[in-house]
Image: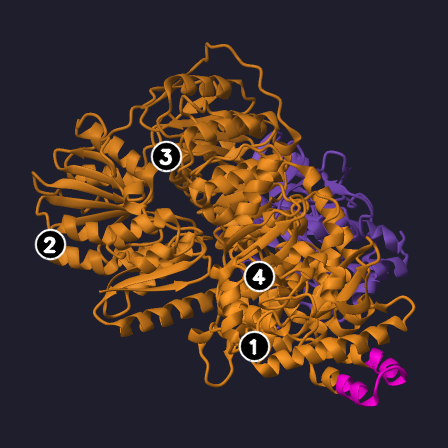
Chain colours: A orange, B purple
């Protein structure tokens, strides 16, 4: 049975998820399990693994999906406990590492202004865009990611070359820049050797042997396995070689490549001859017979290292570097007919082994079969790091599983005489691979008594793993250890009765032409001669390693932009290049900030909204008709119809509404806003707020208190009578009071004071309501044209109604955004509103155009007797508060409200506002929040940021019963749906002339 | 001589360095790191790098104090060092640090020869200043009965038979704690004094022979090597030159400065010098 659990918005990098998958698979009762992000590509892997169901299908790219096959659902709980424990350990580790982390490129460059490299280890499909971004920002790219199309590699490398930058990769597993290890790298002593390699494990084998020989390497630039292909033409290798030639601290240059394209190989060799320093070059698969001038050609990686060390000491290279085997004495020949199997985690080491075995045993061409480097006459050398073994699984340098299975498989084959292994140490690799392989090796030797294991350990004494202990562990298992891969292979061949003598090489003069070396850019010189300052995009452990070795790093907790939607990513990339958008947005935000709201009066709605002179009702959210309205809005309509006395009974009212005798229009289309159902009719009193900066007015009904109230869909006689009292007493009294103020009531002052007193103005308005009462109470008591009884009623109502200020704040928000909407420009959200069916968004450049998506249902606390089942989907114009940066956006100002979020502590409130800060472009210093270290409320929601991050505004809201007539049943929070922002972004892009792919 | 001249106030290098290391590129490594100096092992010999204001080693140089601070923050024993035509490149974990000694003042640290004049040891300020200190209490060797026998041999060298002298030298080579064992410092100070005053090389011959069989630390071996090649540290050279002076205060200052060197190393050397001077006095007394 398949059981799944979705952790929403919980992005983890792929290595963590792979390790987590491993951990989960060890839980008793789990037949199989996968933990992955809910991307489309991963969903295919879930399908392949037989772990796909509807939950997985519905998961979003930023959701973490845990899927298991188990006999009982209880197992899932145990698995989730393992998951939580793993993630919790990670977060503790993160705290301990104290690496600064950010969530977008801009923050990364602000956190590390002198950054010169982007280290990219994210899924390949997204990597090209990030490389380009780095290049556009004048930074080198070190690209661990693979699966980047070769045409993209060519384009980006050409661009880098033109800008004087390097793209190191893609698929560059190893690198060392100014002695700082990048990605999967051993700890090598710095020294006077510089290296450029189109092979990750090739670099690792050569650098570790150099280190163990007492030499040192200052720079090792991985250029990616395809750099010497015909298409790429060694762009990065040539630039890196030229740069290393200028380095004073480099005396010897080493060039390593997998089998290159012939023409490219010749181009590189011509360049090597033109360098001023001695060179050691190895083109794997080539068997050189001589050296030429100062270029020394090696056959094995071991020989490469030995020659480099001799040259670094200014000693002449020897004619032969074949080293005596450590285990030659005392080893027994294996029986005839037995074969050698190589189980390699390093691709280049596998290639080297395959080449040597094929040559010695005359097995012909190497294998082109996926996963194999050699497969002939029973002799097999496997590259277990090949894509076919690592799809959705950790690399065999991290995870022993694939190799353990293969050891078992080969041990069961009586023809297997020798199994060759590599154990690669260094950052990123398994903490104790020798120990992890031990049970399989012991079992294999038990099963197949004559089976010999030969291994090489690629590592140094300074690697995070213990090099000596690793060797000892293997030796204790009876594994024969050789100091290099070449020697390990030679030992295997020796046991087969085939020695592989090395022909001595002489040096001949170089007869070719010397080239003019390309000019070396200052940026590349800086890269190779200073400690790298790195924006680490992806695998977090890379940041720690960089910092431990004297580099600087900022951890960019990268997530797929726009949830991985390629169409939206392309739009965002285009928009990012348009600097004028930031300028336009800054102007929009200035207009929002400079809004000067004053409460002027309370008047019957029809006196200021001409449309309400007819049988028209205003409603919340984007346009909607009766049939589509949910229960509470319909209930409000019935209540308003009764209040206006268009009908005498509920049935009559419903009939009129159903027949279309009453028309509807959004509050927002009439300079108004309305809470919940937002139903506003002509005789309802409305607050008038003037934005004195821009001269516009906005309107909102007054707050009726809590419980059975019209805005939540209640329409009982009590409700209608209260509305009448508000029309006849509350409205006129407040109007008279406000009119005594010469300039109206300055609301910015009240807001600034109340936000410091714990209000966020959506769910909590206690302070603002009290301040309002404090302001109007003396005036009301002094009014001579109002009866004392009415004054008393008004004062009591205001004192009892904690949320009275909410509606004032809503009119304030509307006045402010409408002021900002007077100029159409930028990508700032100017309206967030919901009608119970759809969530509507409007943005600054596109005026009155609505972009909608189905609303979500709030989550929160319910009054006794009600549950989430009773709640109506999200509804109301009150999200105008979030639009101007308060409400859920400023949750940190009102920790008391946080209980609606869930667990509800101050940290939760802080987390919410910090998250909201990521989707806004500014902060409103006028509304400074003491509990946020006096930072201003987040202001100016940018649709680009919302779509890019997938973070949508969090809205604090009341919850109406879904049935008309019941009223409020709870309060909580709700997320704006992403879809409306995506639609807005597409329309915005089109309005700017950006070509948008059609779906 | 003024006190500020006791240590080198500008970047300087021993002339022994250029004599002992041929031009070109040599690879070595950082051998040891101290609070104010470090040693490089290169071509089988040690090179001492100290900061300005300290004694200039016969096999070393003194460098700018700020640069030394920067280096000491980064280097670790084992770091690779390249010497390329007077420029030392130290490949530290943090960065490659270059120390260009080509413009350093080259200082002659060859052992002076005062044997062509008669020096009345007891009247010299050096002897008088040394006598004022309880050197036995300052040195790193515990003077037990066996040690005393060997030191007596050096003090009355003219009466010491060759086997006894061999025993004494063998006893002292490598004796004591630390990277420069006290016995080594003592022996060099002793032999130096006799060589400067009397041009006596007998003790040197014995030392050479004993060093063939007996090992001490690399750093001491470097000092022996320099000494046997005819070079000593600037402080010891200055002390020897002071043997011609009667300025007691200057001698006291110099001896104080030498005494501060190392844990007991400075006093060990001074005690060796003192024994050397005593041996000359004793020898002269017995033969006149």
Residue numbers of the magenta segment: A774-795
**Around disc 4, counting alpha carbons within 10 Å, would you say few (fewer than 14), some (14 to 19), or many (20 or more)?**
some
- The answer for how far apart the CA atoms under marks 2 and 4 are is 92 Å
Q: Quadrant of residue A25?
A: bottom left
Residue A29, horizontal then vertical, whole percent: 23, 69
Residue A701, horizontal then vertical, whole percent: 69, 69
Residue B217, horizontal then vertical, whole percent: 55, 55
User: Would residue B170 be found to the left or right of residue A262 on screen?
Assistant: right
Residue designated by label 1: A715
| Mark 3 vs 4, N-terminal side | 3
| Mark 3 vs 1, N-terminal side | 3
- The answer for how far apart the CA atoms under marks 1 and 4 are is 17 Å
Residue A644 makes an appearance in the image:
yes
Say which chain tag 4 marks. A
**Around disc 3, counting alpha carbons within 10 Å, would you say few (fewer than 14), some (14 to 19), or many (20 or more)?**
many
Q: Are marks 3 and 1 on the same chain?
A: yes
Residue designated by label 4: A662
């Amino acid at each position: 049975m398949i059981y799944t659990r979705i952790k929403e918005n919980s992005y983890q990098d792929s290595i963590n998820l792979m390790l987590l998958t491993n951990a989960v698979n060890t839980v008793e009762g789990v037949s199989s399990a996968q933990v992955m992000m809910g991307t489309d590509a991963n969903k295919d892997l879930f399908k392949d693994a037989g772990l796909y169901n509807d939950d997985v299908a519905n998961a979003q790219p930023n959701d973490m999906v845990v899927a298991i096959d188990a006999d009982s659902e209880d197992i899932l709980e145990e698995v989730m406990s393992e998951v939580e424990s793993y993630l919790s350990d990670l977060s503790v580790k993160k705290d301990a590492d104290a690496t600064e982390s950010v969530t977008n490129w801009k923050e990364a460059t602000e956190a590390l202004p002198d950054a010169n490299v982007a280290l990219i280890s994210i899924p390949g499909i997204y990597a090209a865009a990030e490389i380009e971004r780095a290049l556009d920002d004048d930074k080198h790219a070190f690209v661990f990611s693979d699966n980047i199309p070769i045409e993209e590699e060519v384009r980006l490398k050409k661009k880098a070359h033109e800008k004087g930058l390097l793209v190191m990769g893609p698929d560059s597993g190893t690198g060392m820049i100014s002695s700082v290890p990048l990605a999967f790298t051993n700890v090598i002593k710095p020294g006077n050797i510089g290296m450029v390699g189109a092979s990750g494990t090739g670099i690792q084998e050569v650098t570790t042997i150099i280190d163990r020989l007492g030499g040192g390497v200052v720079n090792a630039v991985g250029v990616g396995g395809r750099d010497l292909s015909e298409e790429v033409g060694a762009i990065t290798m040539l630039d890196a070689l030229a740069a290393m030639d200028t380095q004073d601290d480099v005396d010897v240059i080493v060039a390593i490549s997998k089998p290159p394209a012939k023409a490219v190989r010749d181009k590189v060799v011509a360049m090597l001859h033109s360098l001023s320093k001695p060179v050691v070059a190895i083109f794997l698969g080539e068997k050189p017979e001589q050296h030429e001038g100062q270029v020394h050609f090696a056959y094995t990686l071991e020989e490469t290292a030995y020659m480099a060390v001799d040259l670094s000491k200014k000693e002449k290279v020897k004619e032969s570097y074949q080293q005596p085997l450590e285990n030659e004495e005392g080893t027994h020949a294996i029986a005839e007919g037995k074969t050698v199997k190589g189980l390699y985690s390093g691709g280049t080491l596998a290639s080297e082994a395959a080449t040597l075995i094929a040559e010695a045993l005359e097995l012909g061409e190497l294998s082109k079969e996926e996963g194999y480097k050699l497969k002939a006459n029973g002799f097999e050398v496997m590259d277990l790091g090949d894509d076919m073994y690592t799809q959705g699984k950790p690399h065999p340098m991290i995870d022993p599983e694939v190799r353990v299975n293969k050891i078992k498989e080969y041990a069961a084959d009586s023809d297997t005489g020798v199994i060759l292994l590599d154990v690669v140490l260094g950052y990123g690799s398994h903490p104790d691979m020798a120990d992890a392989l031990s049970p399989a090796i012991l079992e294999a030797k038990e099963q197949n008594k004559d089976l010999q294991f030969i291994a090489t350990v690629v590592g140094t004494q300074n690697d995070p793993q213990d090099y000596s202990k690793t060797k000892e562990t293997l030796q204790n298992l009876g594994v024969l250890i050789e100091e290099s891969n070449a020697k390990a292979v030679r030992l295997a061949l020796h046991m087969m009765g085939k020695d592989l003598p090395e022909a001595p090489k002489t040096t001949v003069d170089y007869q070719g032409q010397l080239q003019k070396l390309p000019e070396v850019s200052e940026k590349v010189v800086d890269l190779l001669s200073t400690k790298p300052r790195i924006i680490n995009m992806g695998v977090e452990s890379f940041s720690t390693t960089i910092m431990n070795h004297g580099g600087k790093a900022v951890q960019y907790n990268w997530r797929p932009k726009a949830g991985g939607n390629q169409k939206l990513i392309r739009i965002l990339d285009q928009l990012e290049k348009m600097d004028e958008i930031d300028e336009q947005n800054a102007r929009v935000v200035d207009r929002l900030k400079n809004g000067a709201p004053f409460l002027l009066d309370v008047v019957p709605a029809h006196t200021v909204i001409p449309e309400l002179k007819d049988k028209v009702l205003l409603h919340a959210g984007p346009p909607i008709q009766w049939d589509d309205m949910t229960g509470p809005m319909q209930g409000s309509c019935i209540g308003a119809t009764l209040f206006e006395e268009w009908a005498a009974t509920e049935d009559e009212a419903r009939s009129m509404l159903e027949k279309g005798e009453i028309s509807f229009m959004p509050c927002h289309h009439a300079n108004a806003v309305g809470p919940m159902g937002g139903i506003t009719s002509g005789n309802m009193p409305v607050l008038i707020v003037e934005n004195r900066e821009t001269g516009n007015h906005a309107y909102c009904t007054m707050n009726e208190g809590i419980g059975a109230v019209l805005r939540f869909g209640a329409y009982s006689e009590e409700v209608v009578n209260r509305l009448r009292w508000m029309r006849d007493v509350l409205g006129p009294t407040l109007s008279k009071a406000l009119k005594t103020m010469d300039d109206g009531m300055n609301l910015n002052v009240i807001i600034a004071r109340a936000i410091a007193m714990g209000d966020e103005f959506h769910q909590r308005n206690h302070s603002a309501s009290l301040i309002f009462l404090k302001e109007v109470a003396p005036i009301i008591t002094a009014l001579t044209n109002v009866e004392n009884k009415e004054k008393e009623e008004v004062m009591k109502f205001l004192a009892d109604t904690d949320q009275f200020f909410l509606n004032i704040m809503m009119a304030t928000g509307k006045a402010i955004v409408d002021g900002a909407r007077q100029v159409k420009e930028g990508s700032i959200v100017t309206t967030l509103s919901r009608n119970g069916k759809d969530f509507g968004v409007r943005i600054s450049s596109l005026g009155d155009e609505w972009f909608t998506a189905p609303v979500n249902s709030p989550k929160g606390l319910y009054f006794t007797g009600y549950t989430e089942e009773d709640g109506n989907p999200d509804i109301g114009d009150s999200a105008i508060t979030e639009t101007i940066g308060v409400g859920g956006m400023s949750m940190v100002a009102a920790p008391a409200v946080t209980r609606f979020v869930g667990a509800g502590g101050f940290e939760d409130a802080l987390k919410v506002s910090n998250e909201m800060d990521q989707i806004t472009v500014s902060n409103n210093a006028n509304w400074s929040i003491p509990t946020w270290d006096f930072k201003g409320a987040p202001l100016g929601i940018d649709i680009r940021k919302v779509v890019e991050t997938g973070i949508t505004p969090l809205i604090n809201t009341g919850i109406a019963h879904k049935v008309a007539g019941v009223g409020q049943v709870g309060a909580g929070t709700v997320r704006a749906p992403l879809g409306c922002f995506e639609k807005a972004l597409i329309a915005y892009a089109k309005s700017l002339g950006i070509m948008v792919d059609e779906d | 001589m003024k006190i500020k001249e006791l240590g080198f106030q500008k970047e300087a290098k021993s002339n022994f360095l250029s004599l002992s290391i041929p031009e070109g590129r040599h690879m070595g490594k950082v051998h040891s790191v101290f609070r104010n100096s470090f040693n490089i092992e290169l071509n089988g010999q040690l090179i001492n790098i100290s900061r300005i204001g300290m004694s200039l080693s016969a096999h070393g140089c003194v460098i700018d104090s700020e640069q030394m601070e920067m280096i000491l923050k980064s280097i670790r024993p084992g770091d690779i060092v390249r010497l390329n035509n007077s420029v030392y490149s130290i490949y530290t974990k943090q960065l490659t640090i270059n120390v260009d000694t080509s413009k350093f003042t080259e200082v002659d640290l060859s052992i002076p020869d005062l044997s062509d004049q008669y020096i009345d040891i007891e009247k010299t300020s050096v002897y008088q200043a040394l006598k004022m200190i309880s050197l036995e209490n300052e040195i790193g060797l515990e003077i037990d009965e066996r040690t005393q026998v060997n030191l007596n041999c050096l003090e009355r060298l003219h009466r010491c038979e060759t086997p006894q002298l061999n025993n004494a030298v063998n006893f002292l080579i490598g004796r004591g704690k630390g990277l420069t064992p006290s016995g080594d410092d003592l022996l060099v100070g002793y032999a130096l004094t006799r060589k400067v005053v009397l041009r006596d090389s007998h003790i040197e011959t014995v030392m050479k022979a004993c060093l063939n069989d007996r090992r001490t630390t690399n750093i001491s071996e470097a000092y022996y090597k320099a000494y046997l090649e005819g070079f000593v540290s600037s402080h010891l050279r200055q002390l020897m030159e002071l043997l011609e002076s009667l300025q007691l205060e200057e001698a006291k200052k110099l001896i104080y400065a030498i005494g501060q060197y190392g844990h007991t190393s400075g006093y060990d050397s001074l005690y060796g010098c003192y024994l050397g001077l005593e041996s000359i006095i004793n020898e002269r007394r017995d033969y006149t």
